[in-house]
Image: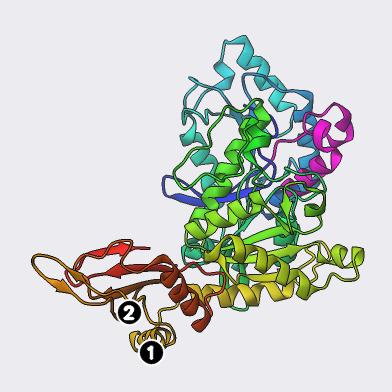
Amino acid sequence: NVPGTTRDRREGLAQIGELTFTLTDTGGFEDASKYEDSFLAGKHGPALLEGMLRQTGSALKESDAILMVVDAQQGIVPEDYHFAKWVRRQIGYNPKDENNKIILLANKAEGLGDAYNWEESVDEHWNMLLMDTRRLGFGVPIPFSAQHGHGMGDLYNALEPYAMVPLSDVQQQLITDNVESKDNIRIAMIGRPNVGKSTLLNALVGSERVITGPVAGLTRDNITVDWTYEGRKFTLVDTAGIRKRTKLYGQNSHSVPTKGQNIQGSAKTSDASLEDMSITDSLRALDYSQVVVFVVDIMAQKDDPDARGMLTKHDLSIIGRITEEGRALIIAANKCDLSMLASREQTEKSVITSLQDQISDTIPAARGAKVVPISALHEIGTNELMPTLIDTYDKWNTRIPTGKLNGWLREAVANQRPPGFSGIKTKKYRVGPLKIKYATQIAARPPTFALFVNRRRPNSDTIPEPYLRYLTNSLREKFSYQGIPIRISIRGSTGSKITM
């Protein structure tokens, strides 16, 4: 119930009976010319409202039918008349045209039911609403209740004529892309607020698909965009910035909740509560992604007392969450153009080395993660991001033949043998020194390997942590698993196993 919750346009497949269509949700209308009194512009200025209007205008021009929603309980307000006039200008509305594509919905009209006869109504409120809605110029409204699902029959009848219109090649391709989006490579743009995630998405797709601006917190919803790059299909997900919990709840914590864990604390304001939900959605996008592009503003770290190099503790906590979920990781070092102008000693190579060293020292699972210096605003370096991302995804999704894998194992063991245990003796049997018999890859996405050892029931101490870390690093180096989490399962002769 907070105004301004929806900002960017969101698309999704919808269905009423046998009618299937693409539904676009847009931000609520506010008169940008009166931004001084606006709920949204009071915090973000007129730029946000103007961006929302551009997004709504794009949705109107791309649509076959427009559902204009008014509040039946509140009645028609001056903003409704102003918005109706704006819509008519956007689409070149002609009231005499029988193919008029605007359908008026009077939402929150609970209890009126389908096929409601406005003309026979004796209720003064509904009669007044009918008179006011006619002044909008879009005909008689459909009584509707989105919360309770009332009025679906009338909405079906209103939409049915549009289903009979032959689809253009572009529209047919859009539906095909939506149906096939399950097979797309899913990429999530993750990072702190105002680091350039939305600007990067717009730079990649080549259009203003999401709202951008200098103020932090403009993006609230996960916005998915299906996109094709060099014949491969992708689903890009723009997410809200993930702030420290301290700023939301006053807690002294840098940790990011693990999967299935709720964000603890009570939000102090409605804005904080909305941001809480936005962060939860961002983490959900991370969980369901295949590749995560972690966007870093390398210029913002110099003013952050929490920064240790180019990354803060909070940045490293988010990267830790990415590797725990087993996602392929790419670091997009944004605003490198400003960094190099500010310091002559700062070069792309130094930015890459600094970020990789800091990540490797803190999060071994992300060792060697690919870093791409970019300027999303000026589209510098963005042409290098996708080839790097595709290469990382392919390695994350690849299975290594068992023969090739065991060739690596023999070489790794020859270079550094397992710790020389003297063997284990029990009342029933004697076990000799530890031997790793062979290895095989049991899964991809992320790469998961099984090491078979000469122990009946292996435990966490079967292969000491330092030697297991040596094998992991050797495996990463041999098969170019930089920035890709690796999981190793130790298995014994009885089939028992333990995953490290």
- The figure's colour scheme reads rainbow
- Residue 414, compared with residue 214, is above or below; it is below
Q: Which residues are magenta?
A: 27-56
**Residue at image location 34% in from the left, 69% down from the top:** 463
What secondary structure is found at the residue carrying circle 1? Answer: helix
Return the x and y of residue 126 as percentages of the image width and height. 61, 16
- Residue 216, compared with residue 329, is above or below; it is above
| Closer to the camera in the image, 366 or 287 | 366
Side of 215 where 414 appears, left or right:
left
Side of 58 where 324 appears, left or right:
left
| Closer to the camera in the image, 115 or 315 | 315
What residue is pinned by disc 1? 407
Residue 439's disc is 2
**Residue at image location 82% in from the left, 34% down from the top:** 41
Return the x and y of residue 354 as percentages of the image width and height. 72, 67
Main secondary structure type of the part rendered in magenta: helix
Q: Residues within 10 Å of mark 2 (few under 14, many from 20)?
A: many
Side of 70 where 184 appears, left or right:
left
What secondary structure is found at the residue carrying circle 2? Answer: strand
Please check the rendered image and state whether residue 179 is part of the magenta-colored stretch, yes or no. no
| Closer to the camera in the image, 260 or 26 | 260
Spot the residue most to the left.
428
- Residue 299, compared with residue 341, is above or below; it is above
Spot the residue most to the front.
422
**Residue at image location 68% in from the left, 20% down from the top:** 75
Measure the C-alpha gap from mark 1 to mark 2.
Answer: 10 Å
Indicate the amino acid at tag 2: Ala
The reply to whether residue 323 is in sight is: yes
Indicate the amino acid at tag 1: Gly
